[in-house]
Amino acid sequence: MEAQPAPSGSTSPTPKPTSTTEILQPDVLIAGGGVGGVAAALALLRAHRTVVLTEPTTWVGGQLTSQGVPPDEPTWIDAEGLGATRAYLEVREAVRRHVRQYFPLIDAARRDPDLDPGKAWTAPLCAEPAIWHAELRAALAPYEATNRLRLMTQTTTVSAAMLRGVVLAVRLRTPSGDVRVRPRFVIDATELGDLLPLTGAPYIIGREKGGPRERGGTGEPHNHWTNADPSCQQPFTMVAALSYAPSRPRDPVRTTAYADFAAVYQSFGSNHRDVFDPSRDWLWKDGRNFWQYRRVRYRGYLSDAYLGDITLLNQAENDHRARLLIPVNGRPDTSAFAAAVARATEQTRGLIEYFQRHYPRPDGSGRGWPGIFLVPGAIGAPTGFAAHPYVRESRRARAEQTITENDVGLAARARQRPSAKAATRYTDSVGTGAGPIDIHRTRAHPGGLFLATYPFEIPFRSLVPRGMRNLLMGAKNIGTTHLANGCYRYHPIEWSIGEAAGHALAFALRDGIEPRALPTRWNEFARYLDDNGVHRHWREDLARVHVESFHI
C-alpha cells in the first residue's frame, strides 16, 4: 500500500481541506477501529490484503477499550467456545495470558483457567480496558510493521465521492491534515454509522413506525406506535474508572450539574437491596453490590493489594438521555456531539460526587466513600473518564435483510409462530450471538425494556446496504430495527459482524466479485467462513435455550 502524490488540479467533492498531502489506495478502507473494525481488519490482513483502518480516539477496541465496557457474553463462550469466532476467543485468551504474565497474582488466581481479573458479576471476563487495547494492538502490529496496515488514530471521515452505488473515495481528517483514500471496498465500522449519510446509503435512526407490516410497520409486538420517531434512541453513557483508598480522602469530585441529576442519583438502591460498597466484597440477600458490577481489577487476586480495585461506572444513573449523539435529521454534527458528551460527562461526575459524599452507606456508618477516586488513563483519556461515549445505538442501514424482534424474541416468536422454538435460521448466516433485547429508558419505553430471546444468527444480507456495491456494514449499524438492535449490540456479536464483513471482502477480492454476489457462491463462501473459525449456526439443543441475562 503506497502513498500516491495528489494529482495536479484534482478536485474534491468536499469543502476545501486544511491540507491534502497524500492519497492512499488500499484494498479496503475500514472506517472505525472499534470491536467490529479490528475484527474486520484482522480477517482481511490474515488473507494478505491491504487495509487502512481509522479510529477517532487514540485506542482501538471501542466498547472494550475507549468506551470502558467489559464484554457481555453468553456462558457458552467459556464453557464450549460457542457464540463467538475463533479469532475473538483467541483475543480473550490473550487477555488472560497478559494478566497472568504481568500482574502479581496469587496462586489460586493464576491457576484458574477461567480467570476473571475483575471478579465481576456482569460478565465472565472483566479485564482492564488498557489490557484489551494492548492485546488488540499486538494482534495488529505485525501488519503495521510490514506496511499491510495503515492505522490512523484521531481520524474521522468527512466526505465520500460516489458513482452509482460505488464509493470512489473517502476524505479523512487527521491531526496533520486531510487524506484521501481510494479503496476497492469499504467497511463502515464506526460507532454511529458515519458513512451512511456521507455515501447516501439508505438508513434509519431511532424507532421505526410500528403496527402491522401490511400498513408499513415493523410488525413487532413491542412497537405499536403509528409513527417513526428518530429521537427515540437508546441513551449513551460516559463511563468513568474508579478506585478506592480507605486510608485518606483524595481527589474530591465536584460539578455544578449535581443538582440537575440529584433525583436520578438518589434513586440508586431505592429497592433497599442494591448497594455500592467499595470497602469489601459482599452481596446482600437478593441484592447486588454495584462496586463489583463492572469491576475490572480485583485486589483480592493480587499479592500486592496496594494496587487496589478498579471498577467502571456504567449504570442506569449515568445513562444520558437529555441529548442525542445522532441528530434527528441524521446528519453529522460535531458541535452537538461535543455538547452531548460534555453534558453526559458532568452527569457521571455528579454520580461520583454522590457516591463520595452523599450516598448512605449500607451498614449505616455514615454517608459517602471519600476514598473513591478517578483512575487517570484507565479508559484512554488522562481524566479517568472514557475517551469516547459508550454507544448503544447507531444509525442502522436499510439493508437487504432487516432483523426484527419477531426473528429473535421469545414472546414475539411464540405470538408469530406458536410452534417456533428457536430464532429465525438463515441460510446465509455469517455468525451467531446470544443476549436479551435490552432497551434502556427511551421515549417509547420510559421504564426500559428487557426481553428474553433465543440464541440468534447474523444474516449476511443484514450487512449489505440497499443499492450499495462496494460498501458493507461492520458494527452495530447493520440492518436491525430499533428493538432488534437491543440484542445485536453486544461485544462478541459486533466482533462477529465485523469479522464477517472482513471475510466477505477477502473472498470477493480473491474471486473478483462484488459482495452482493456472494449469495450466488454461498456454499464455497460458507466453507471459507468455517475454515476461518466462524461459528455460523447454533446446535439444536442450544438454539432452544431462553437467553435472559445481561444488562448493559
Image: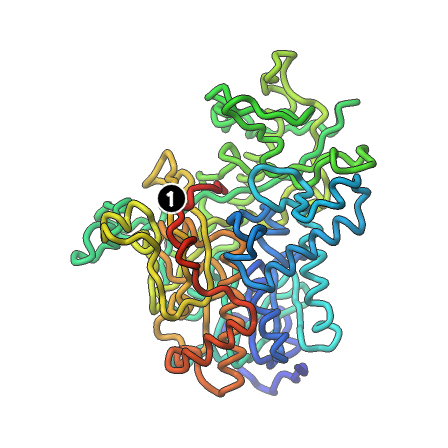
Write the residue at 46% across / 71% down: 472
Colour mode of the rendering: rainbow
Horizontally, residue 155 falls left or right of residue 309, namely: left
Q: Nearer the viewer, residue 106 or 378?
A: 106
The residue that appears at 60% across and 81% down in the rendered structure is: 25
Q: Residue 414's x, y, as percent?
A: 26, 48
Q: Could you say which is closer to the camera, residue 18 or residue 503?
A: 503
The residue sitting at 55% across, 34% down in the picture is: 347
- Front residue of 151 and 511: 511
Q: Quadrant of the N terminus?
A: bottom right
Residue 285 image point, x, y percent: 53, 22
Q: Mark 1, residues whose alpha carbon is within 10 Å: few (<14), some, or many (≥20)?
A: many
Q: Is residue 379 visible?
A: no
The amino acid pointed to by label 1 is Ala
Give the answer, above or below, for where 100 lies relative to 312: below
**362 to 222, vertically: above or below:** above
Q: Name the residue at 79% across, 22% down.
A: 247
Please provide percent x and percent y for residue 74. 51, 49
In the current view of this chain or complex, which residue is farthest to the left? 214
The residue that disc 1 covers is 452
Instruction: Assign a secondary structure to mark 1.
Output: loop
